[in-house]
Image: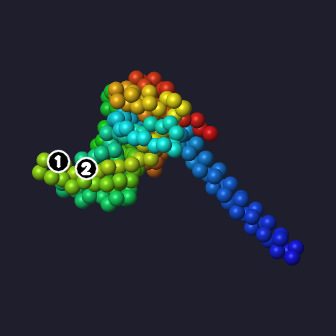
Amino acid sequence: MMLVKRNVWLAVGAVALIQSAALVWMIWERNQLLSNGREIVLEVIPRDPRALFQGDYVYLTYPISRIETPDTAKPAPRGSVLYITLHKLADGRWDLVGMSTTRPQSVGPDEVMLKGRVDYTTTSTATTPAITSVNYGIENYFVPEGTGHDLEKLVGAKMLSVLVAVDEDGNAGIKGLVVDGKPVYEEPLF
């Protein structure tokens, strides 16, 4: 009987240790991304969602969230990984220069690779090109209570940009929000 109790407690302890290690790993990985990732600033475009239970947040969509797909390209299936290459322009903005379902071998010094997942791809018509919708994991940003509506107004006025940290694998995380070139919110590391 004593041996069974001891084994149960050992199993409970092992499970708690594994869960704690997983949580520490997730926090460490996020901290590494925000601390060491290459910083880029992305423009945002308006979108007006509402969620009753998520609190104050701003839903962000980017010019690179909906990408025209060449007619010659085979559409990427929903859920597949898509690698986007961005090039830094002289004015500091980042512009799309390529996309691929395979990871680029290298990117230039003024380029960065983002990894996203395909939400959907539309088919082209005689008047409209095919569009691929991509999610990068940087579409929601939770803000202090009561400030979400004001930030959405800034998005509508095209005054809000997002400071994004990108690691070598193309994973992205929101590091902060920028209004007229000045940081207004910064994501805490812990």
Q: Are marks 1 and 2 in contact (CB under 8 Å)?
A: yes
Measure the C-alpha gap from mark 1 to mark 2.
Answer: 9 Å
Q: Which quadrant does the C terminus fall into?
A: top right
* Depicted 188 relative to depicted 73: above or below: above
Residue 137's tag is none
Q: Between 137 and 47, which is closer to the camera in this rendering?
A: 47
Q: Residue at x 34, y 30 (%)?
A: 156
Q: Which quadrant does the N terminus fall into?
A: bottom right
Disc 2 crowd, CA 10 A, few/some/many (<14, 14-19, 20+): some
Residue 131's tag is 2
> How many labels were placed on the picture?
2
Q: Residue at x 56, y 45 (%)?
A: 30
Q: Is residue 190 left or right of residue 56?
A: right
Q: Is residue 77 left or right of residue 176?
A: left
Residue 128's tag is 1
Secondary structure under tag 2 reads: strand
The disc labelled 1 sits on which kind of residue? Answer: Thr
Hey, which residue is sitting farthest right in the picture? 2
